[in-house]
């Protein structure tokens, strides 16, 4: 258990680009022991994936180059090995699984063939022996009915299944080390829980080490034995899990914890990390975190911090740990905690939006004459209410129809049936010009800030577009002034309006999208996963902004997300969706603290928690979300429900009022 | 002498095209997303060298598009002016003597004697079968057999002098302009250009320019004394024919695109963005059109036009107007048959774009469909249009040659490389063989198509997002 399996020493991987040398990995060292899980934690672009590619010697050529360092696998330096010898190491002793299971499997080969390829390469197994081993592997990664799955193609499998197949391929060579690069980021929480449990079990059985690359503190808390935090190409802190979660030492690690949204922080602004990660093409003279650090003082700018041990197995790269230097630091000026703007006194209670039995069905057309052969029941009878100045969170796994609900409400996808009463007017009945005029009252913020702005337009024109289309904001000079004011409102400089979207970071773009939505003075904003493409520190900035705007302008939000902690921080009411229908809805306290529906319970328990003390029981869900083309009869959830009874297979449960705000669609909600 | 300007249909369209390209260039200067890829084109050495060749061709084409009719000498006293039925262009004036120096029949390049023996009456009254002297080619020589080599060398040296002088003059002006733009001294700028230190590959451009200027001055000096590419069956200078064909080639290559673009862009984008029945109609339309053999459609259309023209001679004032209408019609019919490829590509791109979040955002603002198409979709498919236009150009120039060879191309009286090749069919079968018409058409066409292809490569590298680094 104590034997060191992999030892990385002063590894540097640099990229030469047109804009200078990018030091993606800049001198990192760590050890991974046999049988341990080592987590590499960091935001996007900090060099964590490049570290794993360097270990595998898969750095993109010719732009990238491993400049110096050693990668010792049981004492043998992999960087000295020729490519031919490296090929035997890959897959055989070090295996890798990737983030995106959709693209890492070859779509024209069956699952069996893809696993068999690895077996043939590394174990020399062929024919019946190989097939037997493949079945064994599929069984080991928890794929039901492996006999029938072995000859299926990747498109016939769900995302979670594909990731299991990827793991099976990685296991085929019986590796000593498994590098898992964000293995669950693309998966839903309930599936993520399944995969994490699987990885842990496999590790226990085979005794392999896992190098887990992730940005999710929750996953680290669930999985890791040791944690290394990466920032701008360097490891800034390394500790055991217990040490790390008990007392993170580096200011960056601390900030990461503080910027996480949660129920307890509802009433105040989240701590944010100022600014953004510095460009890795710059040559650093001091600490890389200096420009964003609350504790920075002059030496941080001029002296490169060294590695300090603050406890056994706990190291930090920060001047604060250097007692001689830390003594020179002036005392902190008492910092004022950011206060949220007090909520504007809007008459909460007025129902801004009432949705009754909304249905959005997409016809499936087949054949030459394009006859309707069936429907995708994306949204199948959803009712909800949003009060003025409040936030309703719509929670659910991907594919449950929550985005379609949002688009149906603001009439981007015309609903098939139902009512969308916005201030008493049925939007479904509005057509043409009247609907176009009404659009200024409800706006949308998208998930991906990179595709939500026309790359050929300048920021000023992008924000102005809605005002022009709605004929608000007066003449051109007045509109320009309003745009500048909006930019200031979302925390950007007014000079930026003559720039193009590609000049901005993800967080800045999301701010611009918010400013664009605000330009027409909407009353309701549908936020479709606005923070899920952003890093934790940037997410906190956006959440603060959204909350501030709500308090100031009395906006209502329909907040579509799968992230429970964001819901806990931001929402007033929650609706949980499963396969096109809402299964539970109520106030935030009712649903998150006293969930009644088995699906809500499973969903909440599957969320990885960063508090190691709360060892909550995980309710495991079997299988995947069924297809909305052919939903199961009776209660849609019964095939996966741990408490299913015969009645669940026949009747869809009517919503049951637990309190006057809390409604649950389950036959057994009372018990 | 009075002149009457003549504006043929294709002239007007060519001038409009040049104006549009210039206006587009000025517009692109102010748009960062357009300036960046064009900047990459401008920095590519191959792209700029081929651009200079293309600009030379285009300049000749534009000069050849300024048409007019000269007045005939007035004979009656009423003062009424009659104009010649022959339409001339500015290029004809510049090449004046070359156009007029017509021999009796075939003569080889740089020949002083005819290519075939003739029976001539000698001074003493007897007859003999000899190779007679040409009327113009080498006519200034007393004894071509001994003097011709020296004379060509002497003229070449003069041409070299002219060439170097004019190249130096052009270069000096350009270098001065660059120095003025950069705010540096002229000698510094010249040094930087020589060492290739500037972003734009000026050195390559000056070398290309030198080659072109020397070639032009050589041709201009020698063409005054010799038929440098020989003469054809009716004794017309082949060099003159090849130069006059440039305009035809360019017109086919560019005007066809002009005709095709509105179809391809409007139908493709509308089908991809609006979907529904519009998409169905457009798809059926281009599938149907695609399954008709293109040459057949072109042949049918051109033959119909030919019949129409020959039955309505009163509609055309001059022969040139008649030939020009046929050229325009050929461009249109070529355009009608060739828009489907680009249309299909644009439909696919528009289908992809309509799912983008920014299109949805615009819809959520109540922006009208027409505005979404013009503001959001069009600028984002421009790179595809750009690449398709430059790639199609060379194909169309070649298509003209093939169609004229088959006999359904431009009017037989019009100068075109296709017609030259068509004529060469019989010449190649002659003994001794007449090879220079084919060679001249080949060289002129080859240089143009090669330059266009190299330039389109540079444009594609700059505009194709998949190739961008």
Image (spheres, rainbow, N blue to C red):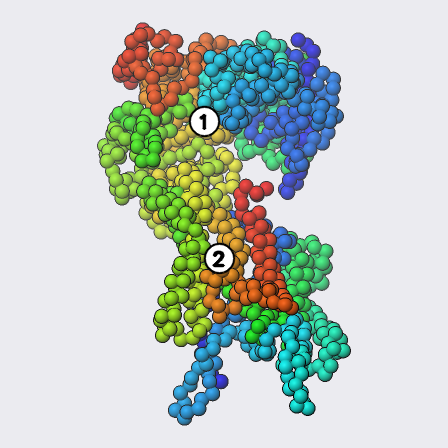
| Circle 2 crowding by C-alpha within 10 Å: few under 14, some 14–19, many from 20 | few
Q: Position of residue A487 (x, y in %)?
A: 44, 41
Q: From the viewer's perspective, is the residue at label 1 or at label 2 nearer?
A: 2
- Rendered image quadrant of residue A305: top right
Q: Position of residue A226 (x, y in %)?
A: 61, 15
Q: Position of residue A92 (x, y in %)?
A: 65, 18
Residue at left offset 43%, top offset 20% = A564
Residue at left offset 50%, top offset 21% = A162
Instruction: Report which residue position mark 1 lands on.
Output: A269
Residue A504 vertical placement versus A170 (above, below): below
| Circle 1 crowding by C-alpha within 10 Å: few under 14, some 14–19, many from 20 | many
Residue at left offset 36%, top offset 20% = A578
Residue B5 vs residue B52: left or right? left
Q: Is residue A468 visible?
A: no
Q: Position of residue A494 (x, y in %)?
A: 47, 44
Residue at left offset 49%, top offset 60% = B406
Residue B243 vertical placement versus A540 (above, below): below
The one of B243 and B289 positioned closer to us in this rendering? B289
Q: Secondary structure at mark 1?
A: loop
Q: Would you say the residues marked 1 and 2 are in contact, meaning their CB atoms lie under 8 Å apart?
A: no
Q: Secondary structure at mark 2?
A: helix
Pinpoint the chain carrying mark 2.
B
Residue A298 vertical placement versus B464 (above, below): above
Instruction: Report which residue position mark 2 lands on.
Output: B24
Q: Is residue B399 visible?
A: yes
- Disc 1 with disc 2 on a shared chain: no
Q: CA distance from mark 1 to mark 2?
A: 50 Å
């Amino acid at each position: 258990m104590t034997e060191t399996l992999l030892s990385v020493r002063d590894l540097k991987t640099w990229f030469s680009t047109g804009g200078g040398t990018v030091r993606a990995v800049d001198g990192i060292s760590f050890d991974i022991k046999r049988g341990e899980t080592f987590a590499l934690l960091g935001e996007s672009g900090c060099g964590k994936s490049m570290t794993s590619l360097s270990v595998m010697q898969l750095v993109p050529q010719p732009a990238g180059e491993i400049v110096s360092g050693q990668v010792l696998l049981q004492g043998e330096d992999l960087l000295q090995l020729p490519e031919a010898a490296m090929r035997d190491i890959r897959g055989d002793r070090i295996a890798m699984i990737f983030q995106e299971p959709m693209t890492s499997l070859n779509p024209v080969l069956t699952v069996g063939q893809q696993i068999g390829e690895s077996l043939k390469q590394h174990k020399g197994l062929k024919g019946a022996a190989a097939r037997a081993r493949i079945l064994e592997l599929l069984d080991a990664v928890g794929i039901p009915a492996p006999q029938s799955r072995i000859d299926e193609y990747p498109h016939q499998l769900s995302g979670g299944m594909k990731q299991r197949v990827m793991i099976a391929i990685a296991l085929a060579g019986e590796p000593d080390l498994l590098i898992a690069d964000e293995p669950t980021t693309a998966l839903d929480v309930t599936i993520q829980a399944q995969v994490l449990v699987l990885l842990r079990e496999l590790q226990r059985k085979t005794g392999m080490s896992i190098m887990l690359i992730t940005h999710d503190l929750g996953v680290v808390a669930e999985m890791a034995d040791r944690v290394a935090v990466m920032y701008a190409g360097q490891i800034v802190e390394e500790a055991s899990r217990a040490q790390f979660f008990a007392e993170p030492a580096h200011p960056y690690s601390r900030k990461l914890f503080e910027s996480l949204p949660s129920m307890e922080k509802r009433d105040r602004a989240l701590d944010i990390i100022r600014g953004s990660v510095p460009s890795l093409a710059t040559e650093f003279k001091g600490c890389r975190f200096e420009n964003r650090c609350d504790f920075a003082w002059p030496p941080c700018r001029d002296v490169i911090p060294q590695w300090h041990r603050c406890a056994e197995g706990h190291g930090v790269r920060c001047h604060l740990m250097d007692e001689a230097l830390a003594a020179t630091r002036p005392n902190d000026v008492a910092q004022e905690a950011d206060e949220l703007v007090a909520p504007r006194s809007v008459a909460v209670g007025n129902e801004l939006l009432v949705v009754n039995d909304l249905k959005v069905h997409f016809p499936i057309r087949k054949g030459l004459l394009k006859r309707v052969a069936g429907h995708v029941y994306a949204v199948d009878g959803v009712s909800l209410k949003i009060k003025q100045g409040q936030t309703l969170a719509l929670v659910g796994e991907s594919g449950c129809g929550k985005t379609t609900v949002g688009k149906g409400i603001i009439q981007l996808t015309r609903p098939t049936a139902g009512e969308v009463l916005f201030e008493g007017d049925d939007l479904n009945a509005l057509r043409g010009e009247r609907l176009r005029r009404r659009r200024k009252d409800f706006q949308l913020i998208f998930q991906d800030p990179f595709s939500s702005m026309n790359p050929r337009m300048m920021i000023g024109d992008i924000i102005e577009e809605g005002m022009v289309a709605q004929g608000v904001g007066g003449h051109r000079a007045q509109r320009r002034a309003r745009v500048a004011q909006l930019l200031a409102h979302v925390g950007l400089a007014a000079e930026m309006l003559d720039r193009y979207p590609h000049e901005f970071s993800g967080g800045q773009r999301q701010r611009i999208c918010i400013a664009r939505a605000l330009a027409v003075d909407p009353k309701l904003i549908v936020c479709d996963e606005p923070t899920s493409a952003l890093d934790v520190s940037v997410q906190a900035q956006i959440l603060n902004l959204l909350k501030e705007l709500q308090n100031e302008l009395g906006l209502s939000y329909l907040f579509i997300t799968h992230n429970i902690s964001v819901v806990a921080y931001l929402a007033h009411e929650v609706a949980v969706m499963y396969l096109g229908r809402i299964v539970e809805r109520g106030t935030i306290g009712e649903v998150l603290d006293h969930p009644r529906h088995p699906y809500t319970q499973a969903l909440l328990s599957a969320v990885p928690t960063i508090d190691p003390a709360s060892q909550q029981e995980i309710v495991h869900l079997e299988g995947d979300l069924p297809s909305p083309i052919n939903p199961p009869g009776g209660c849609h959830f019964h095939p996966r429900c741990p408490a299913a009874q015969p009645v669940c297979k026949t009747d869809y449960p009517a919503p049951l009022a637990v309190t006057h705000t809390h409604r649950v669609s389950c036959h057994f909600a009372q018990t | 002498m009075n002149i009457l300007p003549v504006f043929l249909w294709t002239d007007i369209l060519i001038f409009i095209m040049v104006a549009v390209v210039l206006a587009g260039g000025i517009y692109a200067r102010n748009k960062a997303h357009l300036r960046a890829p064009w900047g990459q084109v401008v920095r590519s050495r191959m792209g700029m060298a081929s651009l200079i060749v293309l600009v030379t061709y285009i300049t000749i084409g534009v000069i050849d598009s300024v048409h007019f009719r000269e007045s005939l000498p007035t004979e009656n006293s009423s003062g009424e002016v009659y104009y010649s039925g022959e339409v001339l262009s500015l290029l004809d004036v510049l090449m004046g003597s070359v156009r007029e120096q017509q021999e009796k029949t075939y003569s080889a390049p740089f020949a002083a004697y005819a290519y075939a023996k003739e029976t001539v009456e000698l001074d003493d009254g007897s007859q003999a079968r000899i190779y007679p002297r040409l009327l113009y080619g080498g006519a200034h020589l007393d004894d071509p057999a001994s003097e011709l080599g020296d004379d060509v060398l002497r003229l070449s040296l003069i041409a070299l002098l002219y060439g170097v002088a004019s190249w130096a003059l052009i270069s000096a002006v350009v270098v001065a302009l660059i120095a003025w733009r950069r705010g540096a001294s002229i000698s510094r700028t010249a040094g930087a250009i020589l060492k290739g230190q500037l972003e734009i590959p000026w050195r390559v451009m000056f070398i290309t320019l030198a080659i072109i200027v020397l070639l032009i001055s050589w041709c201009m000096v020698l063409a005054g004394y010799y038929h440098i590419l020989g003469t054809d069956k009716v004794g017309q200078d082949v060099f003159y024919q090849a130069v006059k064909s440039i305009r035809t080639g360019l017109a086919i290559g560019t005007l066809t695109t002009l005709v095709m673009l509105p179809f391809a862009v409007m139908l493709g984008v509308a089908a991809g963005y609006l979907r529904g029945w519009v998409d169905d109609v457009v798809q059926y339309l281009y599938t149907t059109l695609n399954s008709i053999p293109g040459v057949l459609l072109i042949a049918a259309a051109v033959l119909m036009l030919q019949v129409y023209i020959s039955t309505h001679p009163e509609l055309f004032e001059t022969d040139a107007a008649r030939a020009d209408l046929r050229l325009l019609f050929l461009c249109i019919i070529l355009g009608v048959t060739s828009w489907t490829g680009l249309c299909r590509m644009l439909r696919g791109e528009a289908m992809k774009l309509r799912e983008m979040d920014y299109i949805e955002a615009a819809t959520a603002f109540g922006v009208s469909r027409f505005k979404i198409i013009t503001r959001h979709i069009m600028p984002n498919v421009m790179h595809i249009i750009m690449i398709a236009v430059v790639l199609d150009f060379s194909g169309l120039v070649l298509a003209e040659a093939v169609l004229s060879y088959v006999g359904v191309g431009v009017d037989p009286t019009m100068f075109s490389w296709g017609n030259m090749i068509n004529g060469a069919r019989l010449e190649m079968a002659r003994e001794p063989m007449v090879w220079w018409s084919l060679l001249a058409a080949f060289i002129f066409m080859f240089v143009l198509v090669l330059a266009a292809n190299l330039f389109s490569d540079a444009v594609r590298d700059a505009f194709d997002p998949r190739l961008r680094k």
